[in-house]
Image (tube, helix red, strand yellow):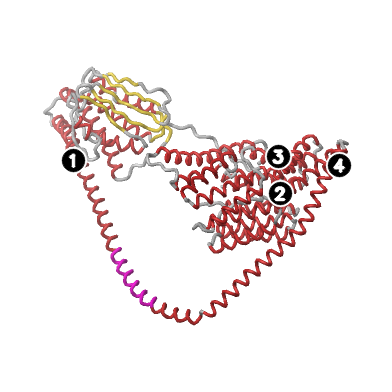
Amino acid sequence: MNFRKSKTIFNYNLLKGWFCVFLISCITAHYSQAQSTKKDTLLQNIAAFKKSKVFNPKDTLYIHNLVNLGAEYRFHNLDSLIIISKQGLELSRKASYLNGEISSLHNIGIYYSNKGKIDQAISYFEKAYELSKNSNSPVLMIRTLNDLAKEYGYKGDYSKALKFYLATIEIAEKNNDKNSISIVNDNIAHLYLEQKDYEQAMVFLQKSKAIHEEVGNPVFMAETLSNIASTYADMNELEYAMYNINISISTFEKEKILEWLAYCYEVKGKIYLKKNKNTWALYWYKQSELLHKEIEDDRGKIDLLNGMAEAYMNQNKDSIAEVYALNAYNLSKKLGLRSGIKTSAYKLSKLHKKKKDFEKSLWYHEIYQVTYESLTQTGNEKALNMLKTKMEYDQQKQQLIIDNEKALAKQKVFIYVAIIVLIIFAIIMFIIHRNEQQQKKLNLELRNKKTDLEEKQAYLNELNQTKNKLFSIIGHDLRGPIGAFQGLLKLFKEGEMTKDEFLNFVPKLKVDIDTISFTLNNLLSWGQTQMNGSITKHSTTQLDSIVEENVALLSEIAESKSIAIINRIEPNCQIWSDPNQIDIIIRNLLSNALKFTPNNGQIVIGAIQKAKTCEIYVKDNGMGMSDDIISKLFEKDSNHTTYGTNDEKGTGLGLSLCKEMVEKNNGKIWVHSAMGKGSTFYFTIPRVQQPQKQYKVSA
């Protein structure tokens, strides 16, 4: 029976051609990374606890992390699961941590279940369930009871399995745990599928599907749809089966849930096998086989191995078929799974008969016959026991309802009196409560209005400060050069200055105009950032190109002071930033360096490329700065005009603007300086990271 048998309740608070092989590799890598991330996080938490000076192994949070770490190894490393779970159990008992003890016992039960040691698994699940009755966690009780029922199903005791499943549903209904109800319905459906009662199985599966449609959890829905698809395949309703399994595959590929994806690929292989499309069947079986290499789920592999054996038999590739059938037989014997033994023994009997090895063929046929008769005989008994168990359970439930109704009838008089008293009391409380609510509402409205006024006042103050600073800069640093320019023009126009005299002022006028232009650019950029009008647009930026343009732009100023600008930026230095804002930063830092570097000085601009960032520096051998000036250098409200070595003027705005733009590009800026020795300004910008290619392949 190809059906996902072990739907486990968790605390959730997841193709065509050879291209599909690549897709599975990507899914496997991503899933493994996600699992590793979870394990790494838990390992880091545990390591942090152990390094703590006040570490105590009885700390329940430490034990909780340890138990969860063990659970992460369920489908990946069973040895780690048992070692960590036993350690968690020992610590939980020493710390009297009940929930930790329950979870540890539950994890140990999972270990023995996956190893095929059903009786030992049942023993641990029973211990966990008995303890969970005294816990304050219904989730633990539901989970352990569901897994206990599941183990009895593996053992073949379907009446006990059904009894525990029904009890699980009752607890889940009391706690309105709809997801757990749907999972148990899927598991009950499996009991009926073992007896080939497809109609009754489909009733429970459709109940589960209806719950998922109401709750809206796509992963749980995909789990149920994959089981519905397997059931439709067994009923030879192959189109319905294919429709449902494709939906499930889409969800599990998106969520990277390998154990369920392996099962879905196997079901899709079974559908093609029933369509007599053996090549396609083997294709999907092999995708499932690839995923099984990443997980430890021996019980889930048995149907896969038998399916591949049958597909190879249909292609007359008997030697390959025999390998898969023998693997299925040995694995079924190891886990004590009689249905797997029956199917694989039948295939091995046919294969040896075809090889004319009649002795082995007869031996396997006898194993098949004995197993088949055992399953058929116990199947009839199980059907009667299941029906009897369900009837007894319903009768007990109905009797409890009747007894409760009788007890309630005797208390009606007292209840009516109590209700009248409560109604009167409720009316009084309602009036009091309504008055309190109205008062609270009025107080809240007043507080909100006060907060709004304070926020608006702060915003207006900030706008006023921005306006004052703009006017101050315009009046102080722009009005003077513009006024001088106007005066010269007036003198020239009125004939008080000859043409030659006017031309002598042209170099000075050019310097003034360049200063005004540079100041205006900074002023506009700063004004935009202050008025929330500047948007940072990140893209791949060639740092060397921007530096070269600015060095060329400022070369005339450098030549006028005989300053050498040395560019050590490597070619093709790419950063992830807004190129316009980087341009403004570089220009301001170079301009500052030129301003404070004396004649015949030197400026060096370079970049140190690190793993994730690029550290850019502008170094000069100029005047340098005191610690007092450095401490105020990047202040937002700084408006201190400074003069360079040749009395060049600045607004005091450039470095504040640089800081804002560096931070908008996810970097930081700082300076090292000493009086008389020069200054070096540093800032970091993220480097371009090479994106990973992604492929989308449809089945």
Q: Position of residue 319 (x, y in %)?
A: 79, 34
> Which quarter of the rendered picture does the C terminus lie within?
top right
- Whole-number angstrom distance, CA of label 4 to CA of label 1: 105 Å
Label the magenta part by its dominant secondary structure.
helix
What's the mark number on residue 472?
1
Query: Is residue 699 visible to the viewer in this orientation of the structure?
Result: no
Q: Identify the mark nearer the N-term, 3 or 1.
A: 3
Q: Are marks 3 and 1 in contact (CB under 8 Å)?
A: no
Q: Are marks 4 and 1 in contact (CB under 8 Å)?
A: no
- Whole-number angstrom distance, CA of label 2 to CA of label 4: 26 Å
Q: Identify the mark nearer the N-term, 4 or 1.
A: 4
Q: Which secondary structure, mark 3?
A: helix
Give the side of residue 129 with respect to residue 373, left or right.
left
At label 2, which amino acid type do we have?
Asn
> Picture quarter containing residue 305?
top right
**Which residue is denoted by mark 4 in the rendering?**
362
Q: Is residue 30 magenta?
A: no
**Which residue is denoted by mark 2 in the rendering?**
2
Q: Which residues are magenta?
A: 425-444
